[in-house]
Amino acid sequence: MQRQVGVDIFSDGEFRRSWFSAAFADSIEGIVDDPDAVFVSSWQGEQGELADQVAADIGFAEQMVGAKLRQTRRLTGHESSFFMQHSPGPFKITMPGVMTRTRTWYKPGVTDEFYPTRADLIQDVVQILRGEVRALIDEGVTYIQLDSLRYVIQLADVSSRQQMVESGEDLEQALDETI
């Protein structure tokens, strides 16, 4: 169908995932549900309530790093192998960007036992993603999208920004880290 409408770079539209950043929790040990966190909905617009319900239905929970991160499998290996078998041409793999979840994963009093600072956690995530990008390139994948909704979900949303300020975060520093 994509070819019929003139699309030259193929995608599964990310429909084979439960959540845009699920690859992290599915592939890395050390990420655990945060029992104290409250999911602040930032879905806006006409279908906002439906989006909130979908998040609840798939069991979306705020998570944190509760141990040293250890990759247990490829983040996108199942997707790239599927595309290599079924794509009629070049395809795009999308994976979560470095800053997608690292702000919410870092919980002082828990995470700092394994990562003294958020920057230390970010560096471990960078290494995991760098390895995944290398593996995709080695497989011949020519289009890789690093996806991050941090700009929208955390930095542009008023309630999320307020939550960040209340937790002691510097919004300018958060923006600098994200960029």
Image (tube, rainbow, N blue to C red):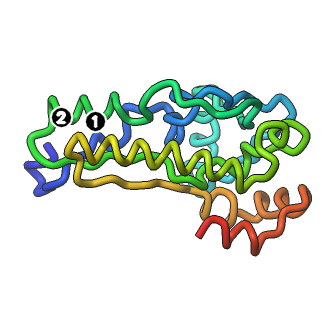
Q: Position of residue 66 (x, y in %)?
A: 76, 31
Q: Position of residue 111 (x, y in %)?
A: 80, 39
Q: Secondary structure at mark 2?
A: helix
Q: Amino acid at mark 1?
A: Ser
10 Å neighbourhood of mark 2: few (<14), some, or many (≥20)?
some
Q: Amino acid at mark 2?
A: Met
Q: Quadrant of the C terminus?
A: bottom right
Residue 172, which numbered label?
A: none
Up-down relation of residue 133 to residue 58 (above or below): below
Name the residue nearer the viewer: 1 or 144.
144
Up-down relation of residue 117 to residue 50 (above or below): below
> Relative to residue 74, is residue 79 drawn left or right?
left
Label 1 belongs to which residue?
80
Label 2 belongs to which residue?
84
Q: Tell me what residue is drawn at x 64 percent, y 56 percent.
A: 153
Name the residue nearer the viewer: 155 or 177.
177
> Relative to residue 169, is residue 132 drawn left or right?
left
Answer with the quarter of the image where residue 138 lies. top left
Answer with the quarter of the image where residue 81 lies. top left
How far apart marks 1 and 2 lie (CA) works out to 6 Å
Q: Position of residue 161 (x, y in %)?
A: 78, 63
Q: Position of residue 19 (x, y in %)?
A: 51, 37
